[in-house]
Image: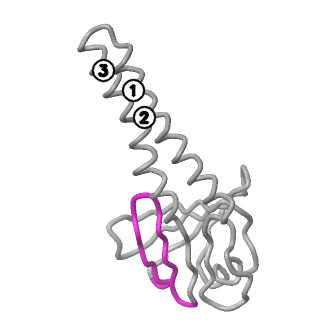
């Protein structure tokens, strides 16, 4: 995820870049084409009905990747506001206020990603690991300044 705005005020949004989203679309189209090709290949060249069925069933997997995983990745983002953050991840959407954060851990950036591990009060979970593709910048450092940190 790369930062969308370079503004020094809030809200500050981290999300995938336009180039990465274009690659997601190309990947989704490739997966759909692979699914269509696999279905046609197994139907036309399957020697038995069971082989045709199995080939068609396995050809559904690329469709699932294209139609479920790619849109889920598309919507991932982290938005920092002055007193809270909004996290839209693969499986969860959460708004977390600074007052709900017990402590935060910021591991060293790896593989072109930075991450923040939050321990929170008042949520259905007590620990949230947020990994963002890109570099941590001044906006994140300013936001984390008043959050209790660990390590």
Disc number placed over residue 54 in the picture, else none = 3
- Left or right of 48, for residue 5: right
> Are discs 3 and 2 less than 8 Å apart at CB?
no
Choose top left, top right, bottom left or bottom right for residue 38.
top left
Whether residue 148 is in magenta: the answer is no
Image quarter of the N terminus: bottom right
The residues colored magenta run 82-99
Q: Residues within 10 Å of mark 2 (few under 14, many from 20)?
A: some
Q: Secondary structure at mark 2?
A: helix
Q: Which one is earlier in the sequence, the residue at label 3 or at label 1?
A: 1
Whether residue 91 is in magenta: the answer is yes
> Are discs 1 and 2 less than 8 Å apart at CB?
yes
Disc number placed over residue 36 in the picture, else none = 2
Residue 65 placed where, x, y %?
44, 44
Q: Residue at x 47, y 69 (%)?
A: 88
Q: CA distance from mark 3 to mark 1?
A: 12 Å
Residue 134 placed where, x, y %?
71, 62
Q: CA distance from mark 1 to mark 2?
A: 6 Å
Q: Which one is earlier in the sequence, the residue at label 3 or at label 2?
A: 2
As displayed, is residue 151 above or below residue 27? below
As displayed, is residue 79 above or below residue 132? below
Q: Residue at x 39, y 75 (%)?
A: 121
Q: CA distance from mark 3 to mark 2?
A: 14 Å
Give the residue pinned by disc 1.
Answer: 40
Q: Residue at x 69, y 81 (%)?
A: 5
Image quarter of the C terminus: bottom right
Q: Residue at x 65, y 58 (%)?
A: 20
Choose top left, top right, bottom left or bottom right for residue 2.
bottom right
- Left or right of 90, for residue 134: right
């Amino acid at each position: 995820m790369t930062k969308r705005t370079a503004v020094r005020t809030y809200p500050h949004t981290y999300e995938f870049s336009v180039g990465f989203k274009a690659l997601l679309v190309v990947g989704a189209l490739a997966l759909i084409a692979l699914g269509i090709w696999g279905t046609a290949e197994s139907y036309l060249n399957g020697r038995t009905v069971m082989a045709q069925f199995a080939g068609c069933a396995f050809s559904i997997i690329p469709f699932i990747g294209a139609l479920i995983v790619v849109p889920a990745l598309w919507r991932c983002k982290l938005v920092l506001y002055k007193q809270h953050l909004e996290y839209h991840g693969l499986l969860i959407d959460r708004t977390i206020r600074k007052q709900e954060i017990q402590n935060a851990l910021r591991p060293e950036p790896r593989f072109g990603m930075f991450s923040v591990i939050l321990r929170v009060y008042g949520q259905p979970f007590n620990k949230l690991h947020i990994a963002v593709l890109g570099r941590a910048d001044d906006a994140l450092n300013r936001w984390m300044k008043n959050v209790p940190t660990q390590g």
